[in-house]
Every structure is written in structure tokens, then in C-alpha cells.
Amino acid sequence: MIPLRLPGISRLASALALLKLALHLGANALGGYGYFRDELYYIACSEHLDWGYVDHPPLSILFLRLSRWGLGDSLFALRLLPALAGAALVWLTALLARELGGGERAQALAALGVLIAPICLGLHDFYSMNAFEPLCWMGCALLLLRLLQGGDARLWLWLGALACLGLQNKHSMAFFGVALILGLLLTPQRRLLYTPWCWLGGSLALLLLLPNLLWQQAHDWPTLEFLRNAQEQKNYLLSPQEYLSAQLLYQHPFTLPLWAGGALALLFHPRLRECRCFGIAFVALLAFFVIQRGKPYYLSPIFPLLLAAGAVLGEHHLPRRWFAGYALLLALGGALVLPLALSLLPPQHFIRYAAALGLGEVKTEKHQAAALPQHLADRFGWPELAAQVAQVYRALPSEDQAQVSLYTQNYGEAGALDFFGRQHGLPPALCGHNSYWLWGTHGQSGQVLIAVGGHPDDYRAFFASVEQVAVHTHEYAMPYERNLPIFLCRGPTVPLAEIWPAAKRYI
């Protein structure tokens, strides 16, 4: 008997939500892998609270600032909120299954489908806005589902407020909102859009989003420039077949009957005819991301709803024995991929295990692949980089140390120097990448510059003397972070303040 039962869902579904939490807390406690590149950048962003950033809205950064204030900067503390978000998503999926008419078995199966999804395990293993995005999508889906079932029209106000929180967490919430509106317009449930409460909810969402929109306008819409550059220069553009194959791997191949059946049920099953707008929304999102060649994980936040619908369908149409057998298959399949989705295995064991299963990384960017997938490879080498730069810094005469500046090629390197450099007494890092460019030069003169990465000719255009003084590398880091030259530049020929506008790189 499980003593704890989470509100609204069965004991078994509650146990699966708690298991999800335990898995992430356990992985965090092991701490075998270090800080992820983006986590170091987000920590830097949390030192510059604002209504927006070049590549993301402000909400997750505010959460991070509060978390750091209350819990500190350890890996365990940093990744506690994503772990809690993961457990909450399992609970919310079971709750959606209940609202769709599912009993205890459907709730548990839907929860199990989310629990074993590699994309959910991976995104809840480190701090990012992606850990919270599915909660916003599915929270809105739950509120809309209750409206479809005759709930109080004032729920539109809550839906509008939650949609705005989703937008303040990640702008892709807008795609989900538009897809839901399209789904409503194409079904008899369009009547819900004609109530004044719907318009009040939309107005509330826009009002709460206004500070971020004003920030975007004041900074010349940097997020649009970032998205355009990323699509043209960085993102790997998947074919439709590659995109669909990625969904299969991200959600776990064994869950295909569950979520595909859920999508078909939302579209065609008479039992769920009131929910047809969700099926249409899924088709619209899938078509949009395939056509726009978006990253494959952009679609992931809608899958818990499909899993919930599929579980309800299975509960009503499958014999108990088949239902239980499929649940067992999901559990075994989840255990099989768990070491690959969480940072549990040492790198050399991870590489061998992935090779034995024949599973590779889903390619999302144009960079050269590493032995480890990017979300793991980008957790190596950062303390060593800061220590190596500190060694160069300490070798300088005291008068040079007083005026030295640090410059890096990307926000991961800058974040590493800012975070790990504190213990070495390093000055703030300068970088032209994304929000680091907006934070400027901190009034530094650039008379002496320690530059990480790049080519010596990049610096000779602005400095009289450029000398390579060190090389940083780590065997498990991404290829572009291995054999990284470190330069010492002296005698600027152009003031740093004049160089800075050309250093901007939104990508």
C-alpha cells in the first residue's frame, strides 16, 4: 500500500510521479557530470535580471535567481526545480487522463508513458526553460478541457494567465495557443471563443506579456534576429522523415501505439468528440514544425496529452491482460534507455552502452558530433577552462592584472569563466554572443586581453601584439571546445568600446 496519493490521481500514478522525482534527485546527487553549457549561461543571466533576453523570455531566469538565493549554486540545488517539474508533469498527465474519462489503469499508463520518454528524462535532468514548458502547455490543455466539458467560463481568465506565464517562459507557447484556437474554430466548440470571458482571458495574457514585448521593442527585437540566424546558420534542417523518426526516439519507440492511438482518438473517436480541437492542434503543430524545419523537440510538450488520450482508449478497448502486458513492456523499455537519458553512466560506459543498443543522437545542429551526445558532452571542461585562464592571468604582472579583460567566443565559455572564475579572482568575462553582448564591456578598457578561442587573425586586426599562450582541451567536450587556443593580446589599436558593436552575434 502506497501511503501517499497525489491529489486527483490514482495511487499507482502517484507512485510513478514520485519515482520520476526520485530518479532525477538520485542522478543529481550522483553528480557524475558537471554544469551544462546553457546552465552556466542562465546563471549569468540571473545576475542580470531583466524583462527579456536575446534567446529566451525572463520567467525561468527569475525562478533560477530565487532558487540560487534560497538553495545556493550546487548542481543538486540547480537541478531541483527541473526534477520537481518532471514529477509534476507525470501527475498532470495522469490528471488529463482522468479528465478524459480514464480510470486508475489509464491514469497509470499515461503517467508511465511520460515517465519513460527519453526527451522528458533528458530535459528534466538539467536547468532550462524546456523543463517547465510542458507544464504550461498541459496546464492550458487541462483548463480548456474543463471548459469543453461545461466548466465555469471564468476559467478563461486562469487559462489566459497561465498562457502568459508560458509565453514568459518560452515564446513557442504561442504556437500551441494558435493551434488550439485553430482547433476550436474548426469544430462546433468554437462557441467557447464567443464568450466575453475568452476575450478577457486573452486580454489578460497580452497585458501580462506586455513588459517582455516592450523590452523586445526597446532592443530592436533581438529574439527575432536570434531565431532567424539560428535557422540559417546553426540548426540542422531535418527532412519530414527525419523529423518523424526523431519523435519516435524522443518519446520512446514502445510508446508509439499509445500516443499515435491517442492522436487518432482525439481526431476520430466518438467518445472524445468534444476534444477534437486537441487532435487538430496536434496535426497543425506537426505540420508547422515539419514545414518550418523546427527542432524536433519543439513538438514534445503536446505528447503528454496524446499519451493520456491513448491510455483512455486502451483502458476501454483492450482486455486487462493485454493492457497489463503493454504496461510491463513500457516499464522494461524505459529501464533499458534510462541510463542513456539520465547522466548515470560514466562517459566511457555510456559510449559503449549506446553503441550496444545501436542508438545515436538525434542531430539538431550543424556542428561536428562528439563521442557523447551534446547534452552530456557540453558538461565537460568548464572548471578546467577557468583554471587555465586563471593560470594565464596570474602569470601577468600586477599592473596588467589590474586592467586585463577576458573575452570568449560563446556564452558557454563566458559563463564558465564567470561562474568558476570567481574562486580564482577573475574579472567578468566579455562576449558578443546573445545576451552577453547586451551586457556590454563593463567599462573595461581592453588594454590587455586574454581571449579564449578564435583565430589569431581575429585579434590582430585590433591589437598590436597577439600571442598564443595556452591550449585548453577535454577529451569528452564538444569538438569546438577541444584544442581551444588562449591568446594574450596587448596594445589595442581601436578602443574596446568602438570594437564592441561589431562583436554582436545573436545565434
Image: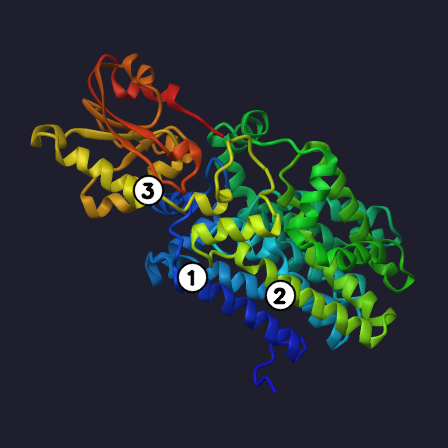
* Residue 84 screen position, x and y as percent: 51, 64
Report whether residue 41 is seen. Answer: yes
Query: Which disc is residue 416 wearing?
Result: 3
Q: Is residue 230 above or below residue 147?
A: above
Residue type marked 3: Ala
* Residue 67 screen position, x and y as percent: 39, 59
Assign a secondary structure to mark 1: helix
User: Which residue in the protein does label 2 denote?
Assistant: 90
Residue 398 in the figure: left or right of residue 428: left
Residue type marked 2: Val
Q: Residue placed farthest to the bottom in the image?
A: 1
Q: CA distance from mark 3 to mark 1?
A: 19 Å
Quadrant for the N terminus in the image: bottom right
| Residue pictured at 62% horizontal, 43% vertical | 172
* Camera-side residue of 338 and 423: 338
| Residue pictured at 55% horizontal, 42% vertical | 210
Q: Residue placed farthest to the left in the image?
A: 398
Instruction: Between label 3 and label 1, give the one nearer the viewer.
Output: 1
Report whether residue 98 is seen. Answer: no
Q: CA distance from mark 1 to mark 2?
A: 19 Å
User: Which residue in the protein does label 1 denote?
Assistant: 28
